[in-house]
Amino acid sequence: MLRPAQMLGMLPTPVPRRNPVGSFDFPNRRCEAISMRVAVISDIHGNVTAFEAVLADLRETSPDLIFHGGDLADSGSSPAEIVDRIRELAWPGVVGNTDEMLFNPESLHDFSRQQPPKLQTLFAAIEEMAIATREALGEDRLAWLRTLPRVQFHGSMSLVHASPESLWRAPAPEASDAELESVYGPLGQPTAIYAHIHRSFIRDVSGMIVANTGSVSLSYDGDPRAAYLLLDNATPEIRRVQYDLEKELNALSTCGLPHSDWLAKTLSTARPQMP
């Protein structure tokens, strides 16, 4: 059984303030070490088969509190079911770029316009999938996605989807210590957690832990298993969870989502693919 604490609603979240040079300032916070186990699950992308497997693993690891890192619904067979489950579980979490893309289509257009011409076929496919996912979710679920904050704090931990200033851009695992410190240091917490890149890692950067959760679905690191982050008394661990890939591929093939063959190839290879 999951612990009762996992059913807590959202924790109070400070609103970042832009300073004159365009970076975010966050209110001063006490960084208290909390003796508890916290899980962060991100980038589910409508993959209910992988999500169910992760839930089963969570029953084994039994965290006291679970956060989600956004990118809940788009690019998968079961977007509405995932959003409904997360709402029922009442996990606190943050908004991801594909969540924003669903309730604010212009955000995808803004980002794609900054990309080279060779990638425009990619963004055209993403837009077609987003249209279908938006329709599957309906206005009530889209309205709920719109309420998700950009940042969460808990004890000594901060959580964003990609970076404090962008839902669409985040450092890669190969980023320098200086880049990671520049991006996540302003959050002011000993542990900074993000998602978005679908490649999990844990780094010690000048005494600050920077960890990426990996992704429940659409892994890009060559390992098709679902990934999530577990913090045990602030010590991070990446969990990998096997799931029935063939079952999800079958669900994708019959769900009517455009470009499901592209998603199937990405799930199977656990590498980024072009549509």
Image: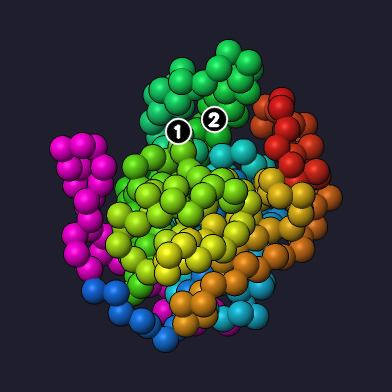
Callout 2: SS? helix
Q: Position of residue 225 (x, y in %)?
A: 74, 58
Q: CA distance from mark 1 to mark 2?
A: 7 Å
Q: Is residue 241 above or below residue 197?
A: below
Name the residue beneath numbered marker 2.
Answer: 130
Q: Which mark is residue 120?
A: none
Q: Which residue is mark 1?
A: 101
Mark 2 Cα-neighbour bin, 10 Å: few <14, some 14–19, many ≥20? many
Q: Are marks 1 and 2 in contact (CB under 8 Å)?
A: yes
| Residue drawn at 37 percent across, 49 percent down | 182
Viewer-proximal residue among 202 and 50: 202
* Sequence order check, earlier mark of 1 and 2: 1
Residue 47 lies, with reference to residue 104, above or below; the image says below
Q: Quadrant of the C terminus?
A: top right
Quadrant (top left, top right, bottom left, bottom right) of the N terminus: bottom right
User: Tell me, what colour scheme is on the image?
Assistant: rainbow
Neighbor class of circle 1 (other Cα within 10 Å; few <14, some 14-19, many 20+) is many
**Could you tell me the amino acid type at mark 2?**
Ala
**Residue for point 46% across, 37% down:** 168
Region in magenta: 1-29
Find residue 115 and report its horizontal and vertical position in percent: 52, 21
Q: Quadrant of residue 139?
A: top left
Q: Is residue 210 visible?
A: yes
Q: Nearer the viewer, residue 6 or 206?
A: 206
Q: How many marks?
A: 2
Q: Is residue 269 left or right of residue 25?
A: right
Q: Amino acid at mark 1?
A: Met
User: Could you tell me which residue is drawn at 77 percent across and 49 percent down?
Assistant: 222
Residue 232 in the image: x percent, y percent? 52, 80
Residue 36: image quadrant is bottom left
Residue at the (15%, 37%) spot, across then down:
20
Quick check: 242 above or below 183? below
